[in-house]
Image: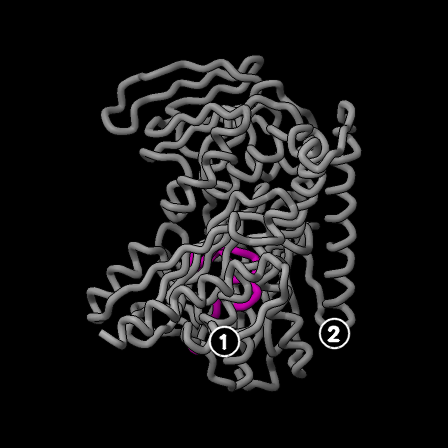
Amino acid sequence: MSEANFDFDLIVIGAGYGGFDAAKHAAEHGLKVAIVEAREMGGTCVNRGCVPSKALLAASGKVRELADSQHLQAFGIHSGPVRFERKKIAEHAKQLVEGIRVNLTKTLERAGVEILRGEGRLEALQRVGLREPNGVDRLISAKNIILATGSDPFVPPGIETDGRTVFTSDEAINLEWLPRWIAIIGSGYIGLEFADIYTALGCEVTMIEALDKVMPTFDPDITKLASRKLIDGRDIDAKAGVLAKSVTPGCPVMIELTDSKNGELSEKLEVDAVLVATGRVPCSKSLNLEELGVETNRGFIPVDNTMRVIKNGSPLTNLWAVGDVTGKLMLAHTAAAQGIVAVENILGNAREIDYRSIPAATFTHPEISSVGLSESDAKELSQKDHFELGVVRSYFKANSKALAELESDGLMKLLFRKDNGEILGAHIYGLHAADLIQEVANALARRQGVIELASEVHTHPTLSEVVEVAYKQAAQQLKKASRN
């Protein structure tokens, strides 16, 4: 088939953040683009993930702040009982979702992207089958195809959901009711954020974690400090090392917990509701990848750093995948970055994704953020490449702005090479940690060293000085090492 005979230069299957950015970028650079979406425009992030959850966190955070009488009294402020309307909080999130969804759709249309409604699948290397909502099947051709179908919540075996008393984050963002006692299965960022929301709005929470400690994916030093406030300091009963063997919806919801190591029954719980926050699985089954001989890894599509799909160890020329379906960093901004990288390569501009410089954040109160390597991975790298690992800690309790806010509970850990000062990673817990991490991410992307960074001037008094102090501590260690 000659290039002139293709229906489109590019077809993107999936209109989440990865698909949106890819389609928009390609259209703005002169390609004829179509985007296929079977559900709501905007994908998980806009409709069922980061956007509505941050709206709920913003509202519940205000409730938490107004209800913290001890904190307010330290300022000399006295407040009465806090009242809120659950329905209006939920409506705030819903309106935000609808507004962003409309804006996203209009942006694609203005860029010249053709929006095709229905479920897309691969019929050949450069052909897409489209099942429209009315059941009609169409065959469309494109020189290049990007798969951006995202992910869905993972529900482990033995857990039965009904969308009302046992549900995932997809339903939780609707905030249809506030259970008096809710169990949250999983203590990753989704579980932590919803625990923050529910406790602020007066719910009792039991957090169930199968691994031997809560917050297992976070830096150990950050976990130790953050858990004191985010878990121990709230109406949360955290249970680690136990598995939710069975969860049965109803009034009450019945939960059987077993020991994660020996499988023995450890406890039975009766709660009002259960939120299943045990991770996400890729949406790839309906893509018909087997037609092209592409083998997935637990449903995740293998890609190289240019975002080309891998088949039998080699990249395919005209097939790409971005976002959660690739199983890399399952974050909206990662998907968007992958989408741009894929299109740049389609345009002939060789480019690779740099996962190490992509930050992540958990929007609890206070926030948690990270970028780059964990300390354990950094130690492995230092042994492999024969350099000494540097670690410094900068505390919010020494920061004037944090003290003025009476929010001095916080820590930044910076990881760097002691031979050349290059930053390897950072982990932050504290006020506005999600914003602070971006400075480190930018430095890491440029592969900058702490000597150069330590000379940069930061505004006083701001929280950014927490980062400045870490840079200066690291630079001092480097100078000492060079003198020895």
- Above or below, 421 against 408 in this view is below
In magenta segment, residue 336: yes
Which residues lie in the magenta part?
317-337
Residue 354 in the image: x percent, y percent? 44, 71
Residue 38 in the image: x percent, y percent? 64, 52
- Above or below, 135 against 436 in this view is above
Residue 164 in the image: x percent, y percent? 62, 25
**Relative side of 65 to 356, left or right:** right
- What residue is at 37 percent from the left and 24 percent from the top? 245
Label 1: state its secondary structure: loop
Q: In the rendered structure, find residue 112 and report the number of the disc placed on it.
A: 2
Q: Amino acid at mark 2?
A: Gly
Q: In the rendered structure, find residue 455 and report the number of the disc placed on it.
A: 1
Q: Amino acid at mark 1?
A: Ser
The quadrant in which the C terminus is found is bottom left
N-terminal of the pair, mark 2 or mark 1, is 2
